[in-house]
Amino acid sequence: MVLMNPVISKLTGKLVVLASASPRRLEILTNVGLRFEVVPSWFKETLDKRLFKTPHEYAVETAKQKALEVAKRMPFKHLKTPDIVIGADTVVVMDGLILEKPVDKQDAYRMLSRLSGKEHSVFTGVAIILCHEKEVIDFYEETKVKFADLSDDLLWEYINSGEPMDKAGGYGIQALGGMLVEYVHGDFLNVVGFPLNQFCKKLGLIFSPPGSLTHNSDEPQGTSDPAAPDLTSRGTMQMQNVRENETEDGKEKLSKMIELMDGFKASKVLFTASKLHVFDVLRSSKTGELQAEDVAQEIKASMKGTERLLEACVSLGLLQRTGKEYANTAMSRHFLLSDGPLSLQGYIQHCNELVWPLFTHLETAVREGTNQHEKAFGKSSDNLFQDAYYSRHEVKLRFMKAMHSIAKVSGRDVATAFDLSKYKTACDLGGCTGAMAYEFAKAHPGLSVTMFDLPEVIEMSGHFRPHDADDRVSFVAGDFFKDELPKADVYILARILHDWSDEKVHILLSKIAKACNPGCCVLVSEIFLDEDRKGPSRGLLQALSMTEGRQRSASEYSLLLKSHGFTTAQNQTLAPTTRH
Ligand SMILES: Cc1cn([C@H]2C[C@H](O)[C@@H](COP(=O)(O)OP(=O)(O)OP(=O)(O)O)O2)c(=O)[nH]c1=O
């Protein structure tokens, strides 16, 4: 592509990120040959408008916050630091009132009828973050647009086209909305969401030779004083040294702290919405959407409480809201519907009913170094499974559902992690509902899998039998510490060993070693701790409520296995070992 603007070519080789989900901005910048990645900002456009003297200050600040959020997130979440992050925010302003995107059709109607027959301003605030230099350049552009007198019929026809909903002021000048417009004074692309002309000028200033950076030679007079911006100007340029290096760093630490402090609230919101079947209720409604009062009625809860719960769910990305209607997000549809193939509901209820009470006694657990079953449930648990999980029917069922959901979510990855084509038989020790065994059978057409677990588990495993159950999976009842193990080429230990002390692990491994022939293999699936035991925190957090078990690193597991003649063949995230 021939680059008309030499400024754009100055960005060649730099990691430029557009912190925007707007397809218009993407198109405008792509059209001029800019190469960039799109990382939509998670910054919520909720700044208090009353705190800004002018609408354009609001747009600029929102643009800045959008860009800063991405600049801060990328080094952690994407493991790379961009050179430049660009953020933008477009607002329509009528009689001093800021109009953003309409929340529903009525809102679009209110906006468009307010604009009918009159002139309004469109402001786009833009922020350019120079990540390495820790500088923010921001500016805004104003364009005046006049609407023709619009009849209600025309307005509703336009609203029903769906076009207004994701656009500031409820119209898109570049498409059908162009019909509503009598004239435009100023940069057309600014209305569409990005003031390209001024953006290129700013880039020119930024990438001109050193010394000229703070010298706004092409700025119209009187426009460079941010304290007194001139609305007729083509914008102001503010170079802010985010000296503030430490301040930014401090802010990041503070938000991490707040995230940690609030983490338990977020978990409990998820548990409660799940227990009250909020996600199922929304899915079952005709349109997949419901208002808070309908949800309250369905889940038999108070209106006030339900509304707060739904709002909190939206903020956590568990639900989405358009106007007053709540709906599941893609993530919730994936993991939170109770009958979904990858439903985590079983595990979530286990966390709510069993892990949560244990964690409320964490302080005592730390002081005493003991598990807190007795305090939490009024009953001690010397043998975790017999005393805690399998003592009562409903607790057993809940625990089995938890294991089932984890096996469903992780089963395919575990089953396909290694080439098992040379093996004919496998035995899934402590396989609970058989979900993992079925995944192995599905992944390996030549493999027959025996699921081995306690008789009280086997008697209920029928509840979880898939309708297309493969008859290569069979169930054998027994206690793997006491009874003879079925013969197999592959022994699967998925999330088993961490529950037990080294002593018990040795008992189990020696029984496997006796049962298997040379060349057979043990496949261990666990959260492996880092060798320095500094992470992953998921494993270390889980350890806090463990009874007699412990979390181990891959080399600790290898040592245990080696002492029974199993040499580690592959040792990655999953560790299968072969006995010679
Ligand atoms: C007035 C007007 C706005 N718009 C669009 C531009 C913006 O995308 C949108 C205003 O919303 P913004 O909040 O500025 O942007 P966005 O939500 O689309 O994307 P992001 O926040 O991720 O950057 O309205 C048009 O496409 N045409 C128009 O005529």
Image (tube, rainbow, N blue to C red):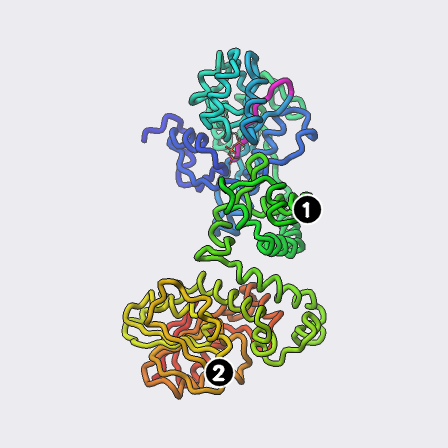
Q: CA distance from mark 2 to mark 1?
A: 47 Å
**Point 54% across, 73% down: residue:** 551
Question: What residue type is disc 1 on?
Answer: Ser
Q: Nearer the viewer, residue 317 or 41?
A: 317
Question: Which residue corresponds to mark 2?
Answer: 479
Q: Position of residue 517 (x, y in %)?
A: 33, 85
Quadrant of the image for the N terminus? top left
As displayed, is residue 27 above or below residue 121? below
Q: Residues within 10 Å of mark 1 (few under 14, many from 20)?
A: few
First reached walking from the N terminus: tag 2 or tag 1: 1
Q: Position of residue 37 (x, y in %)?
A: 43, 41
Q: Is mark 1 within 8 Å of ligand 1?
A: no
Q: Is mark 2 within 8 Å of ligand 1?
A: no
Magenta stretch: includes residue 335: no
Question: Which residue corresponds to mark 1?
Answer: 302
Q: Secondary structure at mark 1?
A: loop
Quadrant of the image for the C terminus? bottom left
Span shown in magenta: 87-96
As displayed, is residue 452 above or below residue 484? above
Give the quadrant of residue 247.
top right
Magenta segment, principal secondary structure? strand
**Residue 526 makes an appearance in the image:** yes
Q: Secondary structure at mark 2?
A: loop
Q: Nearer the viewer, mark 2 or mark 1?
A: 1
As displayed, is residue 259 above or below residue 466? above
Left or right of 335: which side holds 62? right
**Point 65% across, 68% down: residue:** 358
Q: Nearer the viewer, residue 244 or 66?
A: 66
**Point 37% across, 75% down: residue:** 474
